[in-house]
Image (cartoon, rainbow, N blue to C red):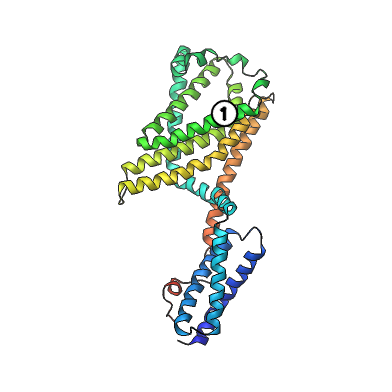
Amino acid sequence: MDITRFIREHKSQWTELEELLLQLNRRKRGLSASHVNRFTKLYQAVSVHLATLQTHSPAGETTVYLNHLVSQAHNALYRESNRSGTQLKQFFLQYFPSLIQARAAFILFALVLFLLGGLLGFLSVWHDPLNLSLIMPGAIADNIDPSKTANPRGDLHSPLVSTAIMTNNIRVAVLAFISGVTLGIGTVYLMISNGLLVGALAAVFMHAGKSYVFWAYILPHGIIELTAIFIAGGAGLYMGYRFFVPGPYPRKLLFLESAKESAQLLIGTIPLFVIAGIIEGYITPSTLSLEMKYLIAGVTLLLLAVYYAYGIRHRANIRANTFAGPPISDRELSNPNTH
């Protein structure tokens, strides 16, 4: 092998890796995701170059130089990938939105089940208001009074209520996820039953001519809260689906893989429930005008859409940038004796 020619052909990649290594060591917050991907590709290629030189020129200066460079890159790479802050940021800004996109069909099906329950609950109570007691526990149904909805409720404006609401909502999401173990049957029941409650209440308030007030109190927290519940429901439905449709893989293996992925979806909903709980504990019972509450609801919907679009676009850009810069061929990575 012509060592001089080999060095001349690959020197630019070694220099680029060295420059990225210097940047990584200088920046306290590390490199961007696209740079880390490029750094990984270069590290793999230069490792192959080192193996080639160790075979043909084990005592050469270039071999010693590459050995030192690869060792430094290895330490920096795994130090960067193991940063908890980096992992958390990548999960919520990239992986979680892409996971939602990948399982969108199941999340939408959870939404359809909820809407079906809502329609049934609405029609049932609209036809006969006494049916409310069949859908809700009697004590709760008896205390529902649309005429008092807009009254000041300062007693609910507290961290304790916010925490209680958060805990309850997370419990519903966890149940929707765990119900996937019942092959999705439990998840279907939870989605429909939650829809029944909302639909029944909507009918009660429409009967009383208070729909505008009702939705002003539901939507500010409900948009985020229900989105999170649909995601958790979709996670449970996906588990059930994979049990029935494992594809070419062993049923148990794919079910366990789907359970892991679904658990990640559930984890991603926790911040959504925290935000929804804060809104429901502080803004929903406040004396803000109904118009302001509708505005807040619109803002939450817009922010959710922006977050999702940003996550999908950001991940797509990272994938595209992974191969930016001088190309590193599969031939280089797999055949060190090419030259």
173 vs 217: above or below: below
Label 1 is placed on what type of residue? Answer: Ile
The residue identified by callout 1 is 165
Locate the C terminus and report the quarter of the image it occupies: bottom left
The part of the image, by quadrant, that contains residue 337 is bottom left
Corner quadrant of residue 65: bottom right
Mark 1 crowd level (few <14, some 14–19, many ≥20, 10 Å Cα): many
The x, y position of residue 105, in whole percent, is 43, 42
Q: Position of residue 298 (x, y in %)?
A: 62, 35
Answer left or right for 216 relative to 332: right
Residue 13 in view of the camera: no
Residue 46 higher or lower than 173, as above or below:
below
Element carrying mark 1: helix
Front residue of this view, candidates 54 and 319: 54
**Residue sitting at 55 percent across and 64 percent down?**
77
Q: Position of residue 64 (x, y in %)?
A: 54, 80
Extreme residue in the front direction: 59
User: On screen, 45 above or below 86?
Assistant: below
Q: Residue at x 64, y 33 (%)?
A: 296
Between 72 and 293, the one lying in front of the other is 72
Q: Look at the image and tell me in which quarter the N terminus lies.
A: bottom left
